[in-house]
Amino acid sequence: MTTHYLEDFAVGQIFRAGPVRIGEIEIKRFANTFDPQPFHLDDDEAKSSFFRGLAASGWHTAAITMRLLLESDLRPAGGIIGAGFDELRWPRPVRPDDELRIEAEVREVIPSRSKPEQGMIKLQTTTLNQNDEPVQVSVGNLVVLRKIAAR
Amino acid sequence: MTTHYLEDFAVGQIFRAGPVRIGEIEIKRFANTFDPQPFHLDDDEAKSSFFRGLAASGWHTAAITMRLLLESDLRPAGGIIGAGFDELRWPRPVRPDDELRIEAEVREVIPSRSKPEQGMIKLQTTTLNQNDEPVQVSVGNLVVLRKIAAR
């Protein structure tokens, strides 16, 4: 359970977590609070919608992905701090009782020019369902401390 | 409260909603479920973190932004359906008792070549705090129905 400094990360490393099941009640509860649209709330109305059935809010999938990333061995020193995303997309809907897992791959390791105690890693995180189909793909930039910061 | 088809959108239109207050209990509850890191959960530990004080999870800000977008006059026919984002970033932390509002600007209106009944709008959404400082900036692509789909 050690934490990782910028120097510990290398391009091509893959971190995994999950699966975790997403239930119908949970989908509706999240939607009720943050994304109250018929296709996230009501089975019948969802059938005639773009999604052709009840689907989780993309923001719910994103939030679950965050929790899975925290459960993985990524463990950057200082915590998982997202500066922002270059890409975030939902190629297919998440359905009630889907089992979600993540695969996060380090794509770049970038020391900061102006701040010697920190850097960034570019992480591509794919969230997959029980059929190994991607339901979310993101490319994010995380702030990571360098070892010098721990001295 | 009419809904808008692709033909009703034009580059430069701006949609607004909010403000809405985000409380400390709400910040900690969201973090506890989806982003359980000390700087989102514990005031004391947050002080010595990257954020120098309790801050909301970026995914919480994103979810609140979604809710505000639904409260705005955007109202695309068929609902707000995000295909994905070209950009999503959090330029500064959201603090307990911040009052958040959004300004969403239509940047592009793109009819689909393959699907005559739909198209996309590219929407830049800025979430601002009570000091008019941006706390989130996103550029997203929404699926929007064309009028032909309603016939």
Image (tube, coloured by chain):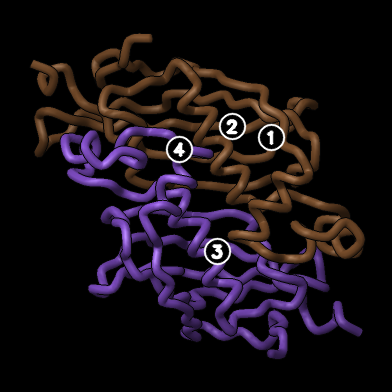
Chain colours: A brown, B purple
Task: Output the chain of dot 2.
Answer: A
Q: Residues within 10 Å of mark 3 (few under 14, many from 20)?
A: some
Up/down of A98 relative to B92, above or below: above
The residue labelled by disc 1 is A134
A56 left or right, relative to A138 = right
Residue A69 x %, y %: 49, 28
The residue labelled by disc 3 is B66
Element under label 1?
A: strand
Element under label 3?
A: helix
The number of numbered discs placed on residues in the rendered structure image is 4
Mark 3 or 4: the one toward you: 4
Residue at 54% of width from left, 28% of height from top?
Answer: A68
Residue at 67% of width from left, 60% of height from top?
Answer: A32
The residue labelled by disc 4 is B35
The verdict on a common chain for dots 4 and 1 is no
Which amino acid type is marked by label 4?
Answer: Asp
Residue at 74% of width from left, 31% of height from top?
Answer: A133
Mark 3 or 1: the one toward you: 3
Which amino acid type is marked by label 3?
Answer: Met
Which amino acid type is marked by label 2?
Answer: Thr
Q: CA distance from mark 1 to mark 2?
A: 6 Å
